Amino acid sequence: MPKIEIFCTPSCPYCVRAKSLLESKNVEYEDIRVDQDHERHEEMIKRSNRTSVPQIFIDGDHVGGCDDLFALEAEGALDSRLGL
């Protein structure tokens, strides 16, 4: 199973939507709250080159945000990226 990281905040509707998609696939992910940890927020920006949440990584590869995750799903490519 790949390592999935999602940098997010609890009040972000896009974060909730992205996590719901991952949960519907029954995959585990690391929920990294950037609203509570400035260092993790800086790490997210450095790794993704973006400041918005969510930012999603699968095995260290930057997938992008919620729309990017759903685009992978629509293309039929998400399951293979998740090892399903």
Image (cartoon, rainbow, N blue to C red):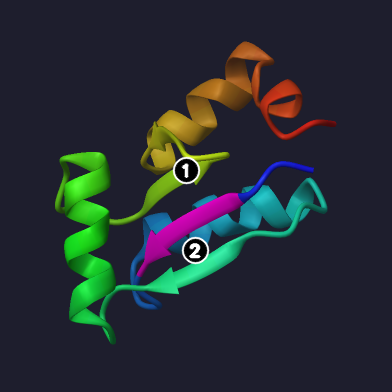
In the figure, is residue 79 to the left or right of 34? right
Which mark's residue is nearer the viewer, 2 or 1? 1
* Vertical position of residue 54 compared to residue 30: above or below: above
Residue 60: x and y in percent read 48, 40
Q: Which mark is residue 22?
A: none
60 and 5: which is toward the camera? 60
Instruction: Report crowding for label 2: few under 14, some 14 to 19, many 20 or more residues within 10 A (C-alpha).
Output: some
Quarter holding residue 75: top right
Residue 3: x and y in percent read 64, 49
Residue that extends furthest to the bottom in the rendered view of this protein: 36
To which residue does mark 2 refer? 16
Q: Image point 44% across, 70% down: which residue?
A: 32
Query: Which one is earlier in the sequence, the residue at label 2 or at label 1?
Result: 2
Main SS class of the magenta portion in the image? strand
**Callout 1: SS:** strand
In the figure, is residue 19 to the left or right of 33? right
Residue 8: x and y in percent read 37, 65
* Vertical position of residue 37 compared to residue 46: above or below: below
Q: Is residue 52 visible?
A: no
Range of residues picked out in magenta: 4-8
Would residue 7 be counted in the magenta stretch? Answer: yes
- How far apart marks 2 and 1 lie (CA) works out to 16 Å
Instruction: Report crowding for label 1: few under 14, some 14 to 19, many 20 or more residues within 10 A (C-alpha).
Output: many
Q: Image point 59% across, 50% down: which residue?
A: 4
Q: Image point 38% across, 61% down: which residue?
A: 7
Residue 37: x and y in percent read 27, 82
To which residue does mark 1 refer? 57
Answer whether labels 2 and 1 touch (C-beta < 8 Å): no
The kind of residue on which mark 1 rests is: Phe
The kind of residue on which mark 2 rests is: Val
**Callout 2: SS:** helix
